[in-house]
RNA sequence: GCCGCCGUAGCUCAGCCCGGUAGAGCGGCGGGCUGUUAACCCGUAGGUCCCGGGUUCAAAUCCCGCGGCGGCGCCA
């Protein structure tokens, strides 16, 4: 594909790209049969060319192709995206996302995203987790709060798109013990923020017998593994995105471990109006994570700010064995997880305490009724992780075809 | 649901306060140019000023509606 064309009196410089990157090609106008074709090509027109590669310090990248033959070409209309639009990071780029993915920037992000997805699978499989798949059509909410997308499912009206595979993973620990999944989740919250999508990629894991300290360790290892893999394989892409590599290189265990209590103290000392029992919102997260240069494991949230299935800490029952991983530099929450309630009576009590109907959770309660083991798990927002690793301003640029409150095209 | 901002050329935007003949850069087209690096220089075409209503002798400009964007809440 033609990336840039610069036509001079007796030469044409054509910067061409393929999936691997870009290189400059030179066409001499003393060969009119070639030059006449190249002269017609617009940005993003395509061609197959043959020539001799030579070292050339004057060329961008240090070498260039002296074109001897054009074997095939296709003249496209003038490409509708220019440098102004790209620089402005405009809404227009989302309208023409099917063309914008050709940009150097999206090229780099998508290659890093590929590495992140691969690293997740490698990590879990190397540690003996089984990959499983939950359904996308579901009949009840995982948690009370989040909103579900209703689906027209034949003549039924109680079917929705899943917002998490967690409950299904909890089912499968009794078969496979250690399970994970990489799947989309859907949230019908009318969120208009730089870190929300209505359809996002969710890496979730559940593990029998896993306890709180083990969970924290697991999260550190997983995130460290992913970041290292990206640093190993995607130096050029990170550089192209202008990412500060130092911050990624410093990602290694142990992460900062901050209890909810300590977080409240830090925030109060920074002058924020917050008291024990309040949820830690996006503004608070930002203040908090700007204090740290590594991911933060924020743990022991009060019972009332976390979903009903979180297990209360027996030594301090007003808090839960819960953890959020906050990405540094103000990026905020990328993981939510914790120990789950394994005791039948305790879970039933919590469901009632939260004003939920036990009959909506019949099979989930069965998991405790018919033999139960302590277990823990978490959900990782992969798009958010990619956003942080790449240093992007908006989650929409971390995924090729973002879905948000209004956008379902392209 | 709440708060703020914006709708003008293919794209990025100025003009709007203070109403009076529609502007620039990029892109397109034509020409020029000593190997260009987001090339550069000259010329040229290109407009339902989002749409609907109102005020006015007169509206891109003021008012109302409409649409879009950003942020918060919620969460990954």
Image (cartoon, rainbow, N blue to C red):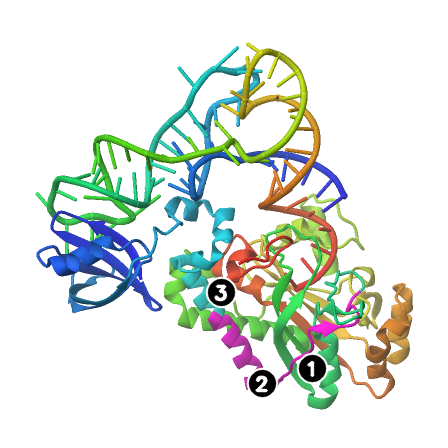
What residue is shown with label 1? A207
Q: Where is residue A350 in the image (x, y as percent from the top left)?
A: 88, 69
In the image, residue A249 lies in the stretch drawn in magenta: no
Chain under numbered label 2: A
Residues at marks 2 and 1, CA–CA distance in whole angstroms: 11 Å
Q: Find residue A239 and report its image quarter.
A: bottom left
Q: SS of the residue at dot 3? A: loop
Q: Nearer the viewer, residue A225 or A354?
A: A354
Image quadrant holding the N terminus of chain A, namely bottom left
A215 up-or-down from A354: above or below? below
How crowded pointer 3 is (Cα within 10 Å; few <14, some 14-19, many 20+) is rated as some
Q: What element carries label 2?
A: loop
Where residue A348 appears, x then y in whole percent?
A: 90, 74
Contact between labelled residues 1 and 2, with CB atoms less than 8 Å apart? no
Is residue A122 inside the magenta stretch?
yes
Residue A144, percent from left and from top: 81, 63
Would you identify the image quadrant in which residue A332 lies? bottom right
Tell me, yes or no, whether dots 3 and 1 are on the same chain: yes
Instruction: Compute the Cα span from label 2 to label 3.
Output: 23 Å
Q: Is residue A17 left or right of residue B20?
A: left
Residue A162 numbered mark, or none: none
Q: Mark 3 points at which residue?
A: A250
Q: Which residue is label 2 attached to?
A: A127
Report the magenta residues as a range: A114-143
Compare marks 3 and 1 and give the one earlier in the sequence.
Answer: 1
């Amino acid at each position: 594909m033609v990336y840039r064309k610069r036509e001079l009196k007796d030469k044409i410089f054509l910067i061409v790209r393929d999936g691997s990157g870009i290189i400059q090609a030179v066409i001499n106008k003393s060969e009119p049969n070639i030059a006449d074709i190249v002269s017609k090509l617009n940005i993003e027109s395509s061609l197959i060319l043959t020539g001799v590669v030579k070292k050339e310090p004057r060329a961008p990248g240090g070498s260039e192709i002296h074109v001897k033959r054009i074997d095939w070409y296709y003249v496209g209309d003038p490409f509708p995206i220019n440098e102004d639009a790209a620089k402005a990071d405009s809404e227009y780029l989302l309208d023409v996302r099917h063309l914008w993915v050709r940009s150097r920037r999206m090229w780099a992000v998508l290659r890093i995203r590929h590495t992140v997805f691969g690293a997740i699978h490698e990590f879990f499989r190397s540690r003996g987790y089984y990959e499983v798949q939950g359904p996308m059509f579901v009949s009840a909410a995982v948690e009370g709060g989040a909103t579900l997308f209703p689906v027209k499912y034949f003549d039924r009206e109680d079917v929705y798109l899943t917002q998490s595979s967690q409950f299904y993973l909890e089912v499968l620990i009794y078969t496979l013990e250690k399970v994970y999944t990489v799947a989309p989740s859907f949230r019908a919250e009318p969120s208009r923020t730089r870190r929300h999508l209505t359809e996002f990629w969710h890496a979730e894991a559940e593990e029998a017998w896993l306890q709180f300290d083990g969970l924290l360790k697991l999260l550190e290892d997983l995130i460290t593994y992913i970041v290292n893999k990206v640093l190993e394989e995607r130096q050029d892409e990170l550089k192209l995105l202008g990412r500060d590599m130092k911050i990624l290189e410093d990602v290694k265990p142990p992460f900062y471990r901050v209890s909810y209590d300590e977080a409240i103290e830090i925030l109060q000392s920074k002058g924020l109006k917050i008291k024990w029992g309040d949820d830690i919102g996006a503004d608070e997260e930002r203040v908090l994570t700007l204090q740290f240069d590594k991911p933060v494991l924020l743990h022991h949230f009060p019972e009332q700010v976390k979903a009903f299935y979180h297990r209360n800490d027996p030594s301090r029952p007003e808090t839960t064995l819960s953890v959020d991983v906050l990405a540094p530099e103000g990026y905020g929450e990328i993981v939510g997880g914790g120990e789950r309630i394994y005791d039948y009576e305790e879970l039933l009590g919590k469901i009632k305490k939260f004003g939920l109907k036990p009959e909506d959770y019949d099979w989930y309660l069965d998991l405790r009724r018919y033999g139960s083991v302590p277990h823990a798990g978490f959900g990782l927002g992969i798009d958010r992780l990619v956003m942080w690793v790449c240093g992007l301003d908006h989650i929409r640029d971390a995924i090729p075809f973002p879905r948000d409150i209004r956008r379902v095209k392209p």
